[in-house]
Image (cartoon, coloured by chain):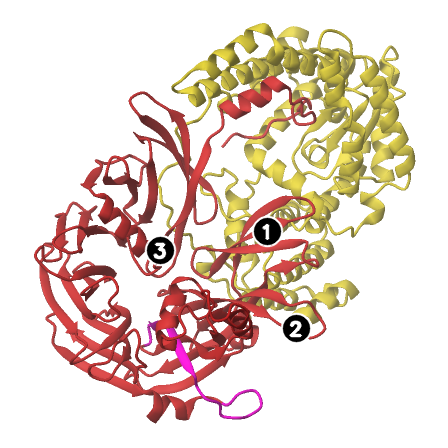
Amino acid sequence: MKLLIAFLCYSSLLVAQNNVNDYLPKNLDSIKGYLEHINRNHIDKIQGKFSSEIKKAYKDRDENIINRINDSVYFFNSEIKENLHNILEVIYNANPEIETKDFNFFIKNSSIPNATCYGNGLFDIHMGLFTALDSDDELASVICHEIAHYVLNHSIKSVTKRVSLINSKATKKKIKAVEKQKYGRTRAGLLLVDALSINMLERSKRVEAEADSLGYVLFSKTNYKPSHAISSLNKLKDVDDMTFHHDVKLDSTFNFKNYEFKSYWLKENTSIFDTEEAINEFKLVSDTIKTHPEIPYRVEKLIKEFGISSKTEVGDKNNITKIKTIVNPQSIIYTIDFKRFDIAIYQLIEKFDNKLIDENFYYISMAKILRKIYEAKKNHELGKYVPPKNKFSDEKHLNTIRLFLNNLELFEVKKLGLAFCEAVPSKISNDKAFKKHLQFFQQK
Amino acid sequence: MRKHHTLVLALFCALMITSAQEKTLNEIASFKIKNSGSFIDKNKDVDGYYFYYEVDKLKKGKREYAIKMLDNNLNDIATKSYVDDKNTILANSKFNNQALMFAMVNVKEKHYKLVTFDRRGKQGNDITIPVNKKEMKWLNAMVKSGNFNMLFPVDNKGFIFNYVIDNKKIGYGLKYVATDGGKSWIYKSPDESKQIHSINPIEANEKVVVAMETSKKSILSQSGNTKILVIDIETGKLLFEKEYDKEENPRLITNAFLSENKELVLLGEYFNKGDNIITDKSLGLFSQVLQLDGAVLNDSKISWTNKIDKMMPPNSKGKKTNRGYVYFHDIIRTQEGSYYGIGERYKKTASAGGIAAAVLNGGRGRNTVTQLTITDALVFKFSDKFDLEDIEVFKKGKSRAPSLVDFGSPQLNAHALKAFGAFDYEYTQIDANRDRFYSMFIDYERLKGEKNKLAFKSIIYNDGQLTEDKIYLQQSKGKIDFRVLPAKLGHVALLEYNKKKKTVNLHLEKLNIDNKIADRD
């Protein structure tokens, strides 16, 4: 999944700026001013032994965020902002002691349910978080967790800890000792890197637990239902376990009277090694440690610490429902814009099967995706956007889509596109946008 | 794979702090790349890629190496630790569906080492073959010649290691290593021979190994004899040999196949008795079918003058032009029985630059005044009886290569220049399952009103038709450069370098078959 995140970050650079209004804010100049302001304030707070090194690290952060905006990493939508604001208002009003005037929540084009606190007042909420949660209460609970990171100053503390650890006398001594080693120097260096990483990862787990506790304190002051702090965590665990696990049934989705599904579209290559996971004889212990404590542990800790009842309470769905209406199609639109056709097809089928998008949107988007796949294959660039199947990946159904898309020949995409367009319900076939896609495949 | 985590506090990813300590630590803990390559079989199908690193210095002159392997989808599948003497070079590697074999060379310790890994990644017993300096030098020269299979995989059976033996003159050894529990063996050239012998395994199945042996009197000799050897794969015993000697039956063999009916099919060019296959002009093309006891079942010949020239298509102006010479890179047999010869047209022409340099130097110096001008790609189609049915011309821009010597024949120069990669032809991939082949060329296109561009062109045979696919190797006004690497069947790996952003992107792309042709199914 780490790879997926990296790829999504990378592919954002390649986005054709189709939805200029949504990906680029109208008030970019004022955002620039805001970012400069919060970053300067943040840097001014840095004091102590390694302050100059830490300040250096934060120096260009505002520019990095601007670059991300220009690379279409975020989605600026007034309706989402308005509904999110309603939830934030409740949290802010219940916790007046927190200075929130510099707070800003950006919506990130990512289907991974996640949120980020930058420590300076800026937060990210991934679109995937809105789709994973079911109530305003659950969303408020996650936001409170992020605000707790801010209140506890975890960002600066963690960076300070890292810089101090690296620059400590003990570490310097260890590095020198490794440098002096005549034999086995690289392995010794790797062990040292591993030890330092483990140290930081353990700390990361501790701060997450701290944010859980304070986050709940902030959340409990609101009128939102306490049990939703637990249900939100459980849903994130479910999503974690269920990511890309919806059975997309490609052999029925792409099986048409005029062009039947071919079993060789899902044929796999023989791999050199027949192992369940990649062999790595240089694997570090820190590679296997998670940054966060396991969710069941976090749930248990919260229940124990605050005596939260596990009984089901009905939450408020007013704002999140409106957000979901925008986010469900948008999370597909941005993957098409980012040319991540594998994720786009997965989401399209999954959301259509679960009735989260309408029929019109499904058919027109699928025709559009098939057309774009044809164009990418024609230009020999599909592999840039859709990675090949990875036999070690646990994203089973996404992997199947990747195998399918990479196995398809150019002429097969054309036939598939035409067969798909010819099979759409008649009420859609008169749509102007749809007609263009149909004509494209008819002319090729 | 690690699952993703929810509610991440941005600490590391948002901030890149690089202190002196971290730089030192990164330097210490990094591996140094020594070389890389691909696991490629006789059909030029890529099974994966490897990267060979030096990791650590160990006691007693040992080193720890890392061999990182990617599958043919570019996914990381293994990073294995490998300990050996310093100066150990990873020379070649192949996969045979049962095991992976690496040929290691150690110049200082004077040995080759064959290292195998089974499909669970477990290292088998190493096989060490002693080697002297002279043998190593010869082996090096043969590898550089470009037409030498050091390691030859036999699918689901074993591997053949081809090496040089310093006997009375120079000979060869074929070391067969079974991976299916069968017997391993060595087949050597005669110890007492006064000739230089070299061998190249060109085909193998579950019964036999077919190898082409060439022999000549001395290193400078421009003539020699060719033999086809058929060896029993279970015992290493020679089943038969067929000599194509200069005096009686000179032939240049470009390809060999073992058919399903257990027959050996040889393809290439034939010559006049007494002709030298390297320096003389061939009379035409041949296909010979042999039984596995050596009996000739069929020997079909097609003459340049009587048949091929008459069928040579006119040029774009409608004129029948002089054929010039055709350099055959490969002859392929399709599953439905037809044969396809892949060649490039070339001529010997005067080199303006060479003449000018020769004039300026007063005839001194090493400049040649002639050059080979390489033009179109030609694809010859033959029936299953080896009758010429068609010749298709695929237009390519002219490329020129200076003759290595002015006095040699164009054929000699072409053969020599082939080893230097002067032709535009790259390789041909054969997909037996889908009865397709892909012949790859690099062409320098001269475009009207546009800057000239390098293009990677593939001539694709599919369903009895030939089509062409093209990838330009420069985009965005030269800001993005591409390098094409071999990949799994029907694909190329594109290494994309963005000069402005200084980013590198490696991705696999399928070669495209023309819609109009494919529409017929």
* Label 2 environment density (alpha carbons within 10 Å; few <14, some 14–19, many ≥20): few
Q: Colour of chain A?
A: yellow
| Distance CA(mark 2)–CA(mark 3) | 34 Å
Q: Residue B433: which quarter of the image?
A: bottom left
The chain drawn red is chain what?
A: B
Which residue is the site of mark 3? B144
Cα–Cα gap, marks 1 and 3: 27 Å
- The location of residue A368, given as percent across then percent down, is 69, 59
Mark in the foreground, 1 or 2: 2
- Under mark 3, the amino acid is Lys
Comes first in the chain, label 1 or label 2 = 2
Quadrant into which the N terminus of chain A falls: top right
In this view, A85 is above or below A257 = above
Residue B389 percent across, percent down from the top left:
38, 87
The residue type indicated by label 2 comes to Leu
Give the mark, 1 or 3, whose residue is nearer the N terminus.
3
Picture coordinates of residue B493, whole percent (x, y): 51, 54
Helix, strand or loop at label 3? It is helix
Disc on the earlier residue, 2 or 3: 3
Residue at the spot 52% in from the left edge and 67% down from the top edge: B361
Against A338, is B56 above or below? above
Q: Which residue is mark 1?
A: B496
At x 11%, y 76%, the residue is B295
